[in-house]
Image (cartoon, grey):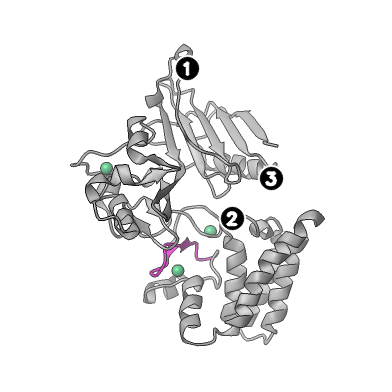
Amino acid sequence: MVRFYSLNCRGLNSPNKRNQLLHDACKSNTDVLFCHETHFCKSAPPKFHNKRFPHNFHAYSSNKSKGVSILISSRTPFVFKDMHADPAVKLATSDVVPVQYTLPVSCGDFEGTLHVNRFGQGNCGKCIRTSNRWCTPLQFLALSGVPDSNTWDAQICVRGEPLNTLLQKKLLSLHDAGCCCDICTDCDSSQQNDDECSVCGDGGDLLCCEECPRAFHSNCHEPSTTAMESFSEPWICTFCKMQQMRKHSEPQQLLSCQYFLLHVLCDPNNELSIIQSKPKELDLLKKRLHEMEGGSGECPWNFISDVILTVIGAYPPQKREKVRGLLEKEFNQLMLS
Ligand SMILES: [Zn+2]
Ligand SMILES: [Zn+2]
Ligand SMILES: [Zn+2]
């Protein structure tokens, strides 16, 4: 079953109105959201997506009182193949801007996700997210082991179709060689990390991990981080701290607890992060964790099993076995390391 939600918005330029709408759409389990009369301006469309709705398409009209947006949820099996304009409504495909969507890309066995809003040229714009870094199309090619960089748009494919076909169809647009937009000029510093918080999926002021591409709001990360701490030294996230500890020694039990809760909250497949829909229970767990950080002496394994029980309890009975399996797998890995 696919749930559609269609709404005449009468203007969505207020951030509060957009947030409220996204919140309502999540709560009502919407899969595809149609918004009419967004009043968005083509030259500067506002941010209108979150972790639940990563795919984002806007159409504009010369008349400012119009505009349509379509948002597609992360759990909808969605492939962007082509775009057609209805001549009857006098809308050219060039008036439709796919602002934010992703494409699964591969080169041989090497895989990544192309984020279209970051795409620039072959050698600028770190637009492909692999499991552990952001890279330009040329860097992606090099990582996959293909030496011929001249044919990157023929070698990198989206479900078997080379990128140059998508460029011809204008589903992707290549920036000019001399382009001086942010994507084409700032290839190193700001493009190494995700644009959204790994926990809540929103943007804004984010702490960027120096080791991996993740980014977090200081209050979303576990442990929460004060501004002072984050500026004093290169900051690395709990995931990377855990990985480093595993290499050298047995991870501290407190770190294991922080890691486990953060792992559940970040869950990229949206199979575990349902805990976020239980704010009271989540607050309680976070509070206990903070007390442990202060030396409350609570047994870490008790804490972790309570996290597991809370997550499982948030699911309807028929789904609980599957979720229990996923959590116990992670728990066993922690016990072994
Ligand atoms: Zn550019
Ligand atoms: Zn966040
Ligand atoms: Zn990291």
Instruction: Say what amino acid the circle numbered 1 marks.
Output: Asp
Q: Position of residue 119 (x, y in %)?
A: 34, 45
Q: CA distance from mark 3 to mark 1?
A: 32 Å
The one nearer the camera, 70 or 105, is 105
Magenta region, residue range: 207-219
Q: Position of residue 143 (x, y in %)?
A: 33, 60
The quarter of the rendered structure image containing the N terminus is top right
Task: State yes or no: residue 217 in magenta.
Answer: yes
Say whether mark 2 is within 8 Å of ligand 2: no
Question: In the figure, 119 relative to 298: above or below?
Answer: above
Q: CA distance from mark 2 to mark 3?
A: 18 Å
Q: Main secondary structure of the magenta part?
A: loop
Is residue 127 among the parts visible in the rendering? yes
Q: Nearer the viewer, mark 3 or mark 1?
A: 1
Q: CA distance from mark 1 to mark 2?
A: 35 Å
Task: Estimate how packed mark 3 is, as few (under 14), some (14 to 19) or many (20 or more) residues with alpha carbons within 10 Å.
Answer: few
Is residue 286 among the parts visible in the rendering? no
Task: Estimate how packed mark 1 is, as few (under 14), some (14 to 19) or many (20 or more) residues with alpha carbons within 10 Å.
Answer: few
Q: Earlier in the sequence, mark 3 or mark 1?
A: 3
* Image point (63%, 29%), residue name: 6
The one nearer the camera, 302 or 329, is 329
What element does badge 1 sit on?
loop
What element does badge 3 sit on?
helix
Q: Earlier in the sequence, mark 1 or mark 2?
A: 1
Residue extending farthest to the right is: 317
> Is 21 left or right of 91, judged from the image as shown?
right
The quarter of the rendered structure image containing the C terminus is bottom right
In the drawing, what numbered circle is on residue 86?
1
Residue linked to disc 2:
269
Q: Position of residue 31 (x, y in %)?
A: 63, 39
Residue linked to disc 3:
27
